[in-house]
Amino acid sequence: MAIVWETLCWQNDRDPTKLRYVIRNNIVNGDAVALIDEALGKAGSYMQPWPGKELSIFTMEGRTLLGTPNGYGVGFMLMDHWLVLGHLKVKSVTAFINDAGGYSLMFNLTP
């Protein structure tokens, strides 16, 4: 992900540290889907169409979403490519059902 983002930024004269969202779309991993449902349930919510439910990364439910198979790659990308991306951090995670009916997670980043 980070290498593609960096390449696109350099080709279009953009600053790669301005990345603010990473969307993981059409999540089909059974373990991830179960964790998403569980985290939303504990937060008193459920999967719903956009705008979905935003969970702070400072809650156990938000951290659970970051720890899913579709989430920890985002954290690893930020850690592994900090020289290019800067010191970006995950601020929150928004869980929603996309237009095709699949699960999606949007990781909101902040410098």
Image (cartoon, rainbow, N blue to C red):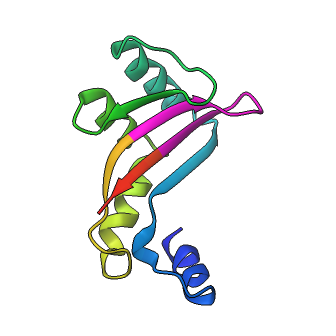
Predominant SS along the magenta part: strand
Judge left or right: residue 49 versus residue 44.
right
Against 86, residue 101 (above or below) is: above
Total marks shown come to 0
State the residue at coordinates (50%, 15%): 46
Q: Position of residue 98 (x, y in %)?
A: 68, 34
Quadrant of the image occupied by residue 60: top left
Q: Which residues are magenta?
A: 93-106
Q: Position of residue 94 (x, y in %)?
A: 47, 36
State the residue at coordinates (61%, 30%): 50
Quadrant of the image occupied by residue 83: bottom left
State the residue at coordinates (44%, 59%): 20
Please tell me whether residue 2 belongs to the stretch shown in magenta.
Answer: no
Q: Position of residue 96 (x, y in %)?
A: 57, 30
Q: Nearer the viewer, residue 30 or 36?
A: 36
- Which residue is at the far left? 58
Q: Quadrant of the N terminus?
A: bottom right
Against 35, residue 65 (above or below) is: below
Judge left or right: residue 88 versus residue 100.
left
